[in-house]
Image: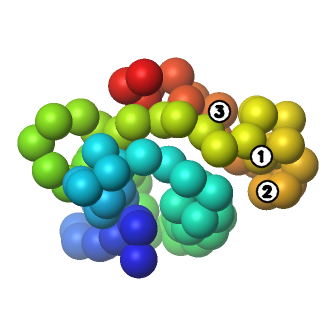
Amino acid sequence: MNVELKIEQHVATVTLARPDALNAVDLATEAELQRIWTELEKNRDVRVIVLTGSGERVLCRCRPEKPVRERRRLLGRGAPRWLWRHCAA
């Protein structure tokens, strides 16, 4: 899995787990994130979500394989736009 989810004491920790690729968010990773966001939205026990990346260099490297419009079309509505603004180029 490219993304790990751990929930403890009302805190969900979402970890990008591709350190060899600088945690780059490819289409498979983005689909996993979308599934996790949907799951967390429904979980009323979760009060805080922490997004982190494995490795020591960057949170994530976002070099999309496809243009943004194509990614959104493939994933449907609701893909978290804020994630792309917080990624290292």
Instruction: Using the rendered view, name the quadrant where residue 68 is placed.
Output: top right
Residue 67 or 39: which is nearer the viewer?
Answer: 67
**What residue appears at the point 63 percent right and 57 percent down from the top-left corner?**
27
For the N terminus, the quadrant is bottom left
Q: Amino acid at mark 3?
A: Arg
Answer with mark 1 or mark 3, whichever residue precedes in sequence.
1
Q: Badge 3 local density, few (<14 within 10 Å), some, or many (20+)?
A: few
Residue 33 visible, this orientation: no
Answer with mark 3 or mark 2, whichever residue precedes in sequence.
2
Residue 35 visible, this orientation: yes
**Residue 38 placement, left or right of 19:** right
Q: Amino acid at mark 1?
A: Arg
**What residue appears at the point 77 percent right and 46 percent down from the top-left corner?**
71
Residue 21 or 82: which is nearer the viewer?
Answer: 21
Given this view, does label 3 or label 2 mark the residue nearer the observer? 2
Specify how the rendered protein is coloured.
rainbow
Q: Badge 2 local density, few (<14 within 10 Å), some, or many (20+)?
A: some
Q: Label 3 vs label 2: CA separation?
A: 12 Å
Q: Amino acid at mark 2?
A: Leu
Which numbered dot is residue 75? 2
Q: Badge 1 local density, few (<14 within 10 Å), some, or many (20+)?
A: some
Which residue has dot 1 on it? 71
**Residue 54 placement, left or right of 83:** left
Callout 1 secondary element: helix
For the C terminus, the quadrant is top left
Instruction: Using the rendered view, name the quadrant where residue 6 is placed.
Output: bottom left
**What residue appears at the point 85 percent right and 43 percent down from the top-left corner?**
70
